[in-house]
Image (cartoon, grey):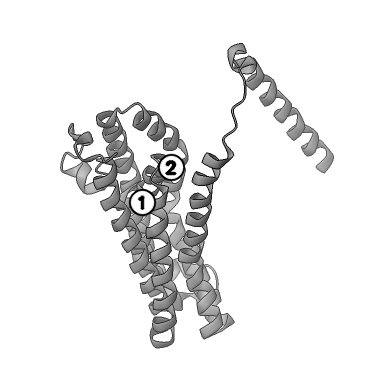
Amino acid sequence: MTEFALIALLVVIALQLLLLWNRFDQEILSSEAIYEPRQWLKVALPLLLIQSFREILTESDTLMVGGILGSSAVGVYDAACKTALWVNLILKSVNLLAAPAFVTLYTQKKLPDLQKIVSAITWWIFWPSLIISLVFILLAQPILGLFGSGFSSGSWALRILVFGQLMSAICGSVGNLMMMTGHQNDTLVASASCALINLVANAIMIPLFGLAGAAFTTMFTLILWNVWLSYLVVHKIGIYPSIFASLLGGRRQDAGGRRQE
């Protein structure tokens, strides 16, 4: 059975390569390759560090709960964390699809069009995320109870974490906008600062308040990161990314007014 699955996978890959090859323009195939390793590293290194700090921001609480409160507590907390991540499922999916449009419109300096797309995307991200959040907040105990009888004790941690994740949906694709428009260095500063705050605050809050302390710290740093980047998106790019801008008619025609070169 495994052999047939592998053969089927190889056939699909071969067909995809054939279709891609046929779509390539001969002018592209005959053009000379240009390599700019310094420029690539200048962009790639901040992106690598941003992702590293994001991992610290989202995973350090679980590791510190395990180290401070023990294995039983970290099992409950990890279940709450993984459940809360479902709130951002729509955001992550949309980010993958929207990134090329962000780059294209920004490089073409079509900022009013970019504002329209950002406002529409934020609208479609927020409402499904809000529904998921309300379900998790109202049904936190029975949802965590699916993991086992002792997991319901993490219900308040789940509610707090859900609110932090919902803030990402409220602010919209701020991280994607910053990195896709060449502002990765500013994003790096925000990510590093929030990761450091997260580590220090967790070391203080977990011994005092247990799972709720870890959840509150993560919620706070997620909110800080999103608000920080939202401010940068407005003042560096001239785009208003949040759901509030969409609700208040945030598809602004003066989107380019605040952009800084």
Q: Is 213 placed left or right of 254 in the picture?
A: right
Marks 1 and 2, how far apart in space? 14 Å
Q: Is residue 213 visible?
A: yes
Label of residue 54 in the image:
none
Q: Nearer the viewer, residue 249 or 49?
A: 49
Expressed as whole percent of the image width and height from the top left, the position of residue 43 reads 49, 45
Check if mark 1's residue and mark 2's residue have beta carbons within 8 Å. Answer: no
Snapshot quadrant of residue 156 = bottom left
The residue lying furthest to the front in this view is 38
Q: Is 37 placed left or right of 112 in the picture?
A: right
Decide: is 128 above or below 10. Answer: below
Residue type at numbered disc 2: Asn
Label of residue 95 in the image:
2
Q: Secondary structure at mark 1?
A: helix
Expressed as whole percent of the image width and height from the top left, the position of residue 252 reads 18, 35
Position of the C terminus, as image quadrant, is top left
Q: Is residue 1 visible?
A: no
Decide: is 201 above or below 12. Answer: below
Q: Secondary structure at mark 2?
A: helix
Count residues near mark 2 (Cα–Cα under 10 Å), then give few for <14, some for 14-19, many for 20+.
some
Question: Tag 2 or tag 1, which sits nearer the N-term?
Answer: 2
Q: Residue at x 37, y 52 (%)?
A: 186
* Label tally: 2
Q: Which mark is in front, 1 or 2?
A: 2
Residue position for label 1: 129
